[in-house]
Amino acid sequence: MHHESFIHRCLELAALGRKRTGTNPLVGALLVRNGLLIAEAWHEEFGGSHAERLLLQNFEQEIRSTDTLYVNLEPCCHEEKKTLPCTSILLERGVKRVVVGMVDPNPKVAGQGIALLRSRGVQVVAPVERVPCERLNRGFVSLMTKARPWITLHNARTLDGRIANADGSPLKITSPQQDAWAHEHLRAMHDAILVGVGTIIADDPQLTVRLSNTKVDQINPLRIVLDPNLRLPLDTKIVTGKAARGTVIVCAESLDAAGHARKALLEERGVVVALLPLHSDGHFVWDALWEYFRMPLQGFHGIASVLVEGGPGVWQAFRGAGMVDEEVTLVGSPTMSH
Ligand SMILES: NC(=O)c1ccc[n+]([C@@H]2O[C@H](COP(=O)([O-])OP(=O)(O)OC[C@H]3O[C@@H](n4cnc5c(N)ncnc54)[C@H](OP(=O)(O)O)[C@@H]3O)[C@@H](O)[C@H]2O)c1
């Protein structure tokens, strides 16, 4: 088998960590002997062992000089909190051949892991399948290079350009097939879904992942609502019952007394209400927003990717600030629109 196929297996394993690794990268590792895969591991959760370390810790046999270790991200060479560098365990265990998918964009690594291994006589082939490797870790790459999550803007419109009914009430635009695709390929692939308060008031969405394909991760993304004045009705779905514990409402620091009373009611239910600074244009200060979402919140260890779903107010804010990495518009056919 070729290097490329083994790196693709690393990516499949790495993806199992999605929504669990927080601001850490998604990483899978394999050990190959005589062309056969003999061990594999992935970075399972934030703060857990790195994939290569986990693999070598669990692999009890001697490593042979002809064995090859595959990993989709360059092994780290720096010590972080309680985590020892992966290059050390590779050297200690006598790994002599390593194939790496992409260089680590973390400035603390940035090619130094590969250089260190080479300087110690390890044969390193890198990068192999860099584009799909960077694609899988687009959230981590964005955090490292832009200090913000990867942002996908997702919206729907009819062929004649409508996004809602004339009175602002929700219009069913997409087909069941388009909805299924969006749940599997957009909602299930992002750490968070973000909307403005206008969408909550107009549509009262659930903002969950609903999939028929049980092979795909069913963990719901964190729900984020931009709501400077805390206008969100208290009976909407995302702040009611179990859903409350997966929702973060972002409000202005200058919230009035009535707003503070509503904030307390929401917090009693488990909703997180964040108070962040507003810019003079009425938009949240972007740096403050992204810094806030790097923190552990509602079971997430930092947000690496955000799906911006609606409506025009947030679309314009994100587009205007150059905060869109990818945009997906689903166009409904005329027979489906009313
Ligand atoms: N076809 C689609 O794909 C789609 C998707 C979603 C919604 N919709 C439709 O869109 C309509 C709602 O539009 P909308 O523009 O009101 O919805 P929205 O974008 O969800 O909400 C807009 C409001 O969110 C707050 N906001 C947005 N960006 C902000 C930022 N960067 N900083 C601070 N606050 C921010 C502001 O609240 P304040 O006004 O309180 O300042 C703003 O007025 C509805 O008719 C809905 O059915 C269509």
Image (cartoon, rainbow, N blue to C red):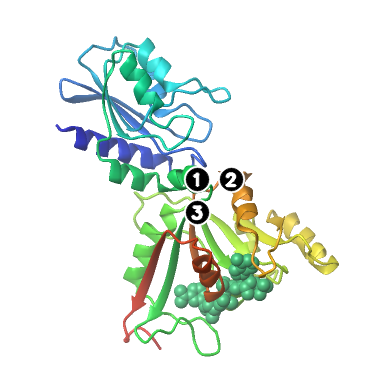
The residue lying toward the viewer, choosing from 236 and 47, is 47
Image height check: is 123 above or below 103?
Answer: above
Q: Earlier in the sequence, mark 2 or mark 3?
A: 3
Q: Please give left or right for residue 289 compared with residue 14 in the image.
A: right
Q: Secondary structure at mark 3?
A: loop
Q: Earlier in the sequence, mark 1 or mark 2?
A: 1
**Mark 1 vs 2: CB contact within 8 A:** yes
Write down the residue under mark 1: 143
Q: Name which residue lies at 40% across and 16% down.
A: 89
Q: Which of the 4 image quadrants contains residue 13? A: top left
Residue, disc 3: 220
**Residue type highlighted by circle 2:** Arg
Q: Residue 243: horizontal and vertical position, in percent?
A: 60, 58
Mark 2 or 3: in front is 2
In the rendered image of this protein, does residue 270 appear above or below residue 229? above
| Residue 204 visible (yes or no) | no
Closer to the chain start, of discs 3 and 1, is 1
